[in-house]
């Protein structure tokens, strides 16, 4: 019997009050992820399974939509995102509408491509995954642009078709198109984790939003380079770029994740998580579509989209957190490996015994052999 | 809190668990890709943009064609009468007892390319009425509204009044379809009634129509031939 700190289970073990397994002594049970020192907190709402230093109920773009990202990389992505928004504001204030729109709509997709590379979510099929997510999303984004142009005729007070078509039907069509590509990947046995569904859904939504906004804003691009009213431009550009990217990635990601966890052969349990995830994704799209039809001004519209995006991120985290706790499964202590989240040398288990991070939320290339239950 | 587990002896980059990208390469890649795409797309857009500059509102009047398939709308509540070409305009709000009349302009393919709404109210300051009417335009449909200039010689039903022209982009509720449009609002008062005419139309900058409105002729018939309540 040797020291568990070197990875061999046996010496410093303790019985987990929640799952009953003998696990290495630490802050968290390496088997079920529950805190070892707090009875009754098995759902660990104060410690999000993909980023244990944060609570589950938190609106954080990076740790929610980029769950595989190690703790040490999170702040870099967050700083790039904040700096990008600052550049958008600066360009819009200078009335450079086209460059500001482009930066706003490119920011999240570019970060997500870097994230896909960094976390290697696509495993050994980068071309297939990118084709069925980002590229298919982009193609469907342009298709939707054409559909919406046909189905929506503007009026001073709204549209000829009324709120049912403009506020309900079109958002539902858009959401279905954003999901189409990723759902093909559901048939691939190797992509059986809920976080795969989130990543594919978010990537497709970002490709969709990018092309849809560029196609829809083309007249801004072909107008004189410096034009427009700064205040209006800032509100519109932020809403249709960064905020819409977050909302669309959130709705598509949460629906895909919810479907993924209950697909045949996957480990999600029955319950409220999947229905709530699917309903939240479509519900937010329809609610914003109807609200947009009656929105009194661009500021209200931006605030509404931002609030919806913030609430949606919490729903995404609840779905992911629940899925990570469910999917961990039973796993014995393996050899000691560095945790990608806390960078401590810990026995390879479903959860890091030191920080509680789910191994399934680690970058795929960083998972030690046998880490996946 | 002291951890019972030692720190990893491996560096964060290059050994043991390693990130595939350093902080510097993440920042550099993001900045590089975004800068490249923004530069290329902006360059292409500027190159394909039309550089034609028309004469705007100060163009010579276009030769008007006679109205075809003439029809008439009579508002019984406020007593105004509108003659319009049924081939060019379709009435969208035909209730004669309401406060307004709404007409849609369509192109040859039946696509809506403009709209004119005439709204009646108790006599009021026409400048204020024009300013207030701008808020009628759905902010989700009409974005980037930029004042162009006051409409010189604005009149409704040959009654002098006030008017303002704007440039804007019309966007559908999902933010997809987007076209440059012109917006013109005019108001005139006769007796104890103020009529406010709100109109938008797709623009054609290669032409010489006022505010580049492609529907200027059909709107002009409505505005010129409109009659306030008599007596």
Image (cartoon, rainbow, N blue to C red):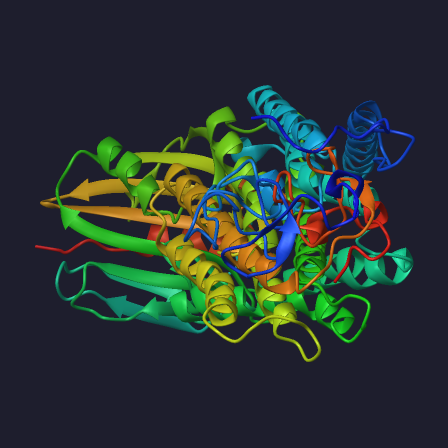
- Depth check, front residue: A326 or A76: A326
Answer left or right for A85 relative to B146: right
| Picture residue at 20% right of the left edge, 69% below the top | B96
Number of residue marks = 0
Q: Quadrant of the N terminus of chain B?
A: top right
Percent of width and height locating residue A89: 57, 24
Percent of width and height locating residue B47: 82, 35
Answer left or right for A305 relative to B23: left
Picture quadrant of residue A259: bottom right
Percent of width and height locating residue A369: 86, 54
Look at the image and tell me whether residue B175 can be seen: no
Q: Quadrant of the C terminus of chain B?
A: bottom left
- Depth check, front residue: A224 or B115: A224
Answer left or right for B125 relative to A312: left
Location of residue A279 with respect to B62 vertically, above or below: below
Location of residue B84 with respect to B143 vertically, above or below: below
| Picture residue at 68% right of the left edge, 80% below the top | A264
- Depth check, front residue: B86 or A369: A369
Percent of width and height locating residue A175: 58, 65
| Picture residue at 57% right of the left edge, 70% below the top | A173
- Depth check, front residue: A155 or B101: A155
Q: Farthest front residue?
A: A1
Look at the image and tell me whether residue B187 can be seen: yes
């Amino acid at each position: 019997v040797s020291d568990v700190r070197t990875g061999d289970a046996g010496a410093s073990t303790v019985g987990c009050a929640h799952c009953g397994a003998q696990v290495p002594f630490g802050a968290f049970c390496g088997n079920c992820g529950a805190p070892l020192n707090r009875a009754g907190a098995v759902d660990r709402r104060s410690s999000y399974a993909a980023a244990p230093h944060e609570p589950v109920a938190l609106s954080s773009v990076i740790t929610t939509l980029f769950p595989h990202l190690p703790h040490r990389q999170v702040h870099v992505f967050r700083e790039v995102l904040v700096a990008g928004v600052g550049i958008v504001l600066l360009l819009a204030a200078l009335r450079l509408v086209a460059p500001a729109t482009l930066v706003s709509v490119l920011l999240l997709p570019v970060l997500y491509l870097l994230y896909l590379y960094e976390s290697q979510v696509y495993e050994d099929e980068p071309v297939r995954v990118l084709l069925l997510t980002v590229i298919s999303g982009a193609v469907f984004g342009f298709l939707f642009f054409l559909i919406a142009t046909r189905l929506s005729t503007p009026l001073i007070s709204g549209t000829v078709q009324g709120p049912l078509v403009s506020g309900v039907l079109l958002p539902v069509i858009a959401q279905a198109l954003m999901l189409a590509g990723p759902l093909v990947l559901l048939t691939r046995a190797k992509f059986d984790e809920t976080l795969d569904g989130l990543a594919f859904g978010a990537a497709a939504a970002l490709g969709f939003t990018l092309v849809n906004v560029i196609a829809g804003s083309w007249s801004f691009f072909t107008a004189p380079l410096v034009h427009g009213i700064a205040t209006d431009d800032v509100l519109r550009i932020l809403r249709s770029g960064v905020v819409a990217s977050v909302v669309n990635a959130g709705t598509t990601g949460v629906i895909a994740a919810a479907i993924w966890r209950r697909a045949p052969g996957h480990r999600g349990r029955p319950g409220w998580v999947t229905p709530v995830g699917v309903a939240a994704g479509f519900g937010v799209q329809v609610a914003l579509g109807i609200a947009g039809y009656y929105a009194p001004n661009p500021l209200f519209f931006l605030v509404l989209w931002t609030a919806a995006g913030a609430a949606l991120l919490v729903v995404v985290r609840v779905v992911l957190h629940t899925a990570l706790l469910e999917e961990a499964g039973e796993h014995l202590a393996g050899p000691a490996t560095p945790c990608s989240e806390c960078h401590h040398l810990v026995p390879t288990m479903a959860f890091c015994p030191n920080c509680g991070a789910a191994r399934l939320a680690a970058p795929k290339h960083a998972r030690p052999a046998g880490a996946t239950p | 809190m002291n951890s019972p587990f030692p720190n990893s002896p491996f560096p964060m980059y290059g050994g043991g668990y390693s990130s595939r990208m350093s902080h510097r390469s993440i920042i550099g890649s993001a900045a590089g890709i975004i800068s490249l795409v923004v530069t290329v797309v902006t360059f292409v857009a500027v190159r394909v943009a039309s550089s034609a500059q028309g004469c705007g509102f100060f163009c010579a009047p276009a030769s008007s064609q006679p109205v075809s398939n003439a029809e008439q709308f009579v508002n019984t509540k406020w007593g105004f009468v509108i003659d319009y070409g049924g081939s060019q305009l379709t009435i969208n709000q035909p209730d004669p007892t309401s406060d307004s009349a709404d007409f849609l302009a369509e192109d040859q393919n039946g696509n809506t390319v403009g709209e004119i709404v005439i709204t009646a109210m108790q006599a009021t300051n026409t400048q204020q009425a024009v300013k207030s009417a701008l808020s009628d335009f759905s902010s989700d449909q009409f974005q980037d509204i930029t004042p162009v200039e006051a409409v010189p010689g604005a009149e409704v039903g040959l009654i002098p009044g006030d008017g303002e022209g704007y440039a804007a982009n019309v966007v559908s509720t999902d933010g997809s379809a987007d076209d440059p449009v012109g917006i013109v609002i005019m108001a005139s008062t006769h007796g104890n009634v103020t009529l406010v005419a709100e109109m938008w139309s797709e623009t054609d900058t290669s032409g010489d129509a006022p505010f580049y409105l492609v529907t200027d002729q059909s709107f002009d018939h409505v505005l010129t031939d409109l009659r306030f309540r008599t007596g």
